[in-house]
Image (cartoon, rainbow, N blue to C red):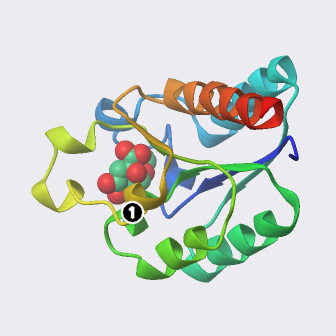
Amino acid sequence: MSRLVYVLNGPNLNLLGKRQPEIYGRETLADVERDCRAIAAELKLDIRFHQSNREYEIIDWIHEARETAGGIVINPGAFTHTSIAILDALNAFDGPIIECHISNVHKRESFRHHSYVSQVASGVIAGFGTQGYQLSLRRLARLLDDAAAQ
Ligand code: CA2
């Protein structure tokens, strides 16, 4: 199985570290990408790291991942709670998917408590801050290792 992993980020995550630090922390998305690349090197994963405010772009990256990648880490942002289209795209992906949220969505407004993505995710992480991305990559590496050993 491919050790290429897509790390996908949804709307407004480009603002990370620039607003609402009490919820999302002070790290920017560039910091998150740097940390992901460092841990990916340790785990011998290759990563493609993307962010978009456009639903179709995220869907296109998921379709691309179908052809090339072994796994996906996705923080769909607010699309988590609204997008059947992203769910459908993820349903067509064969490898493990980790859903990652910076904040603890369950401690927040009730509209953040439901995720369309969770039903296709191997695992969900929320409330670990931006460290959640590193933990997601660790889990994905383990799942890819286990699948390779089967
Ligand atoms: O906790 C998360 O990671 C979320 O996916 C973030 C989304 C939110 O809609 C989800 O319910 C939970 C929002 C991302 C917005 O990111 C910002 C970062 C800094 C300033 C403003 C927005």
Residue 142 in view here: yes
Picture residue at 11% right of the left edge, 56% below the top:
110
Q: Is mark 1 within 8 Å of ligand 1?
A: yes
Look at the image and tell me in which quarter the C terminus lies. top right
Residue 18 higher or lower than 6, as above or below: above
In-image side of 112 versus 72 (left or right):
left
Percent position (x, y) of residue 77? 43, 58
The number of callouts visible is 1
Q: Depth check: 108 or 120 in front?
A: 120
- The reply, left or right, for residue 106 in relation to residue 103 is left
Residue 55 position in % (x across, y down): 55, 78
Residue 115 relative to residue 133: left or right: left
> Vertically, is 9 above or below 35?
below
Front-most of 20 and 60? 60
Q: Residues within 10 Å of mark 1 (few under 14, many from 20)?
A: many
- The amino acid type, in three-letter code, at marker 1 is Thr
Q: Is residue 45 or residue 149 the one in the foreground?
A: 149
- 127 vs 118: above or below: above
Q: Residue furthest front?
A: 150
Query: Residue beneath label 1, please?
Result: 80
Query: Residue visible at 28% across and 36% down?
Result: 104
Can residue 19 be seen in the rendering of this structure? no
Picture residue at 77% right of the left edge, 29% below the top: 145
Q: Position of residue 8 (x, y in %)?
A: 64, 55
- In the image, 125 versus 14, the foreground residue is 125
Q: Residue at x 83, y 17 (%)?
A: 42
Report which quarter residue 105 is drawn in.
Answer: top left
Q: Tell me the element at label 1.
A: helix
Residue at far left of view: 110
Asked if residue 43 is positioned above or below residue 76 in the image, the reply reads: above
Q: Based on the displayed image, in which of its 4 quarters is residue 25 positioned?
A: top left
Image location (x, y in percent) of residue 66 = 77, 67
